[in-house]
Image: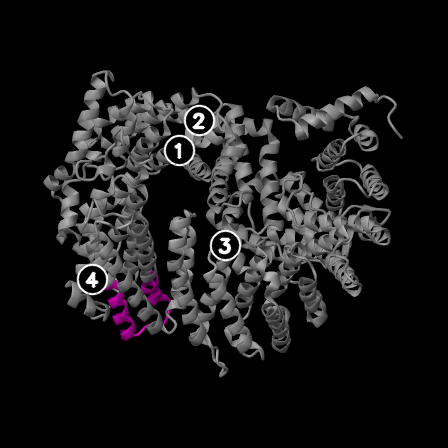
Amino acid sequence: PKDPGISLQSLAELEVLCTHLYVGTDLTQRIEAEKALLELIDSPECLSKCQLLLEQGTTSYAQLLAATCLSKLVSRVSPLPVEQRVDIRNYILNYVASQPKLALFVIQALIQVIAKITKLGWFEVQKDQFVFREIIADVKKFLQGTVEHCIIGVIILSELTQEMNLVSLPSNSDMKPSAKHRKIATSFRDTSLKDILVLACSLLKEVLAKPLNLQDQGQQNLVMQVLKLVLNCLNFDFIGSSADESADDLCTVQIPTTWRTILLEPETLDLFFNLYHSLPPLLSQLALSCLVQFASTRRSLFSSPERAKYLGNLIKGVKRILENPQGLSDPGNYHEFCRFLARLKTNYQLGELVMVKEYPEVIRLIANFTITSLQHWEFAPNSVHYLLTLWQRMVASVPFVKSTEPHLLDTYAPEITKAFITSRLESVAIVVRDNLDDPLDDTATVFQQLEQLCTVSRCEYEKTCTLLVQLFDQNAQNYQKLLHSPSAITVDKAIQEGRLAWLVYLVGTVVGGRLTYTSTDEHDAMDGELSCRVFQLISLMDTGLPQCSNEKIELAILWFLDQFRKTYVGDQLQRTSKVYARMSEVLGITDDNHVLETFMTKIVTNLKYWGRCEPVISRTLQFLNDLSVGYPFYYISMKIDAVKFMLKNHTSEHFPFLGISDSYSLSDFRCRTTFYTALTRLLMVDLGEDEDEFENFMLPLTVSFETILQIFNNNFKQEDVKVGLFLNVMKDDFAFKRYPTYLPILQRTIERWYGEPACTTPILKLMAELMQNRSQRLNFDVSSPNGILLFREASKMICTYGNQILSLGSLSKDQIYPMKLKGISICYSALKSALCGNYVSFGVFKLYGDNHFDNVLQAFVKMLLSVSHSDLLQYRKLSQSYYPLLECLTQDHMSFITNLDPPVLLYVLTSISEGLTTFDTVVSSSCCTSLDYIVTYLFKHIAKEGKKPLRCREATQAGQRLLHFMQQNPDVLQQMMSVLMNIIVFEDCRNQWSVSRPLLGLILLNEKYFSELRASLINSQPLPKQEVLAQCFRNLMEGVEQNLSIKNRDRFTQNLSVFRRDVAEALRNDGSSEPCSLDMMS
């Protein structure tokens, strides 16, 4: 009944609210409407107002608002009473049944409410009945009605299946939502999902049994919703290991064993193949999506004969599609079919495929389909990835095939390679003349396709090599003619350069393919033939600089050089490799030492002449960096003239990308970091104790600092703006030996440009690098104060940055990380390095009244309090610097922790509690360790308090403060015990040893609460299991004493491992018995 207190005026107000919320363009009004929505949800009149909107609302948006409110209402942390949720569910079911012609988005929103109520109440019992599991019986009533009612019934099942697959539970216990979700999802899978799939398939069979009326929109909608339902069933996360969507080609569908009979029936696959051939494109691609999942069924579901039969049916379906390819002209169908083909090889071995009767004909059809697809490169380019995946995996499997049946890949693989090569070369003219988007500009896709092609190209390599030699010679000659022709047309030149770029990429690809396929001396000689041509092209291009230059060719050359480096440069290769036979004749390159000289000459040339082109500079520097860490370059580098030149002349005069001018500068300053990282690595090879060599290397940087110092001393009269940018040249190559002289410059820079991350980030990173005692490099003399002086400078910089950055106030979501949190994370990383670097005695500061240590700790607290708990965990770099720092503080500086104000200490402990449940094991392990130090400190204080020995008064007061705080906030440690117990009992605990260490201390400090948790878990289980669980808990504490000695901890850790295994076994059920309560620790 309608609430008499609600007037039509309030209905009008709600209608206005809907308009502002869903169709309004005024941001202020929208924000106000969102606030009003939250108030509506929290108001006691929420349900009656929702009813009013549904029954008397004049627009679909009024009904949508009601659905949104109800959805949020039933998902709240404190659930509504069972009776009320049953009433809401029944009301919505009756409402959509009485108004089947509602807007589709309204129907879906209302059905989502039913799905959420069903999921969240899945285990709730009333009068010995699961009150929310009758949904399938309710849906069958819809299926017996009109087409519109039938559609609503199917949508209910589809939304329910999708909702059951989502980890979206309210946090109404200390458990991670995923634990409760898995219990519900597993029960739903075992009790209902198979029935839903069978029901959906029977509906599809009924559709096919009658003549299809494709003009009937209602029938089309019904088929679409049923196909979506089947797809949701097949996409279900059956075992709780949701596949990474980015790894689409590696997916295996873990179909339950109880579904075997459905899949073994040939009619099941035939049904979906028939639907594909009978339905229009929008629907047929859904049928193909279902087939993709069927093709991905786990191998272990079938015996070998069953698997062969199942595969045979799939291959017959592929043959039928390829023999009737009309439907593949639709991009959606084409894409799904390519995915289908890739999944065949993902789940079935080549040896199994060749045994299928239709294999020779099907592999021919697939080869022709692939060749046609490659030739039409502009049609659905994203789908080619799946076809190349298929061929790459097929060719890679050839050495492992034991079957005597021919695989025919030696016939078709060279044709695939040829089609790829020729189609890419032919595409260039079309791209240039029609001014289309160049595929070469999408380097990520190009690299991915080339890496797949490299395996395919090595099959029958002689054919591929001959083709590439012929094409390269022909195009190189044409390009030379155009270069020497004064009347050359620009378009022709651009076409020829594009073709050469593709050919260089392709040569690099096939050379790199040596590592993926069995190779012979003859193949190495062919690689030499191809490589000669690219090295000659490099010489030709570099001779003509700067007039004769092409970015695409340069990027392709860098790809080739990197592939050649990986394949033919290194200690794993014999010096007599045939690749150098031809190269020594033509180019005088006899071994990899000569190649390295060529590499370095090319790198220096690029850095000199391509300073304005960021892609070329960036890739060149990455190549230099990769070279600098590899053998044998590391040992012969100082003999190469180009290396000596770089070490003595690393200035913007020689390498323009290092400079900053009004006309150009690199936007990515990390290029300089990469350059100096590689350069200093080369410097250190033969440096030893040669201080003069080091001074010479540092001279350009010293000059830069002196220039900046003069600008500071002139009070920025002329170059105010440039200094911040100029400092980026320094990066982390600032010599530690010079820090007393130049660190004040960096301090002043932080003070002035604290709001410019491009300026502050490199300086803070430099400081963090200086503080890190990597390989015990900060090994000062006994009489040296440098360790303390270094820490004082770091303290000043962190304090300066911390104070300044907090003055920025609140920042928007997109600005908060680059402007603030990134700098804070680097400061935390630097402080952590200093605290555990073992080169500073921190007691000295207090002893001599130096406040630098206290100041930096206070700066740590101020910065921490300006960050929300959610941000601490959301930004990975911040969490991975904060939690290890906290671990250091709790290990060595508990006096600081105990002196924190209660709100600050509560913030820190809450951050530990939240970090315990994160999936990042670095963070969760640090949290466990920090908690262990705190619990151990408290336990020892309580143990010693009873003995009353002569103790340090200050330490006693510190322990007393912590004890008092815990007595005032007993729920803090209790909650963390609950979290850890839930992780052990219900979660996939990946760091069990770390979790066990603080848990023992928590149990000893809170024995009464631990008993309550134990009783709660035991009593929540059926009677037969209660005694088993009680015994598990008795075994957990067996032999464990009331202390935290290492021996006692180790005993508890061993017991915990057995406890976890035994409890998991005890809680395992078939999903059809009484529900297991997972809220025992709320």
Q: Callout 2, which amino acid?
A: Met
Q: CA distance from mark 4 to mark 1?
A: 44 Å
Q: Name the quarter where the C terminus is drawn.
A: top right
Residue with the mark numbered 1: 828
Give the mark nearer the N terminus: 3 vs 2.
3
Please say if the residues under marks 2 and 1 sit with CB atoms less than 8 Å apart.
yes
User: Is residue 478 toward the left or the right of residue 955 in the image?
Assistant: left
Residue depth check, mark 3 versus mark 2: number of the one nearer the observer:
3
- At mark 1, the secondary structure is helix
**Residue at the spot of label 4:** 592
Q: Which mark is residue 115?
A: none
3D distance between C-alphas at marks 2 and 4: 52 Å
Three-letter residue code for mark 3: Asn
The residues tagged by marks 3 and 2 sit, at their Cα atoms, a distance apart of 45 Å
Q: Secondary structure at mark 2?
A: helix
- Looking at the rendered structure, the secondary structure element under dot 4 is helix
- Would residue 851 be visible to someone looking at this image? no
Label 2 CA crowd tier, 10 Å (few <14, some 14–19, many 20+):
many
In what element is the residue under mark 3?
A: helix
Numbered badge on residue 382: 3
Mark nearer the N terminus (1 vs 3): 3
332 vs 641, nearest the viewer: 332
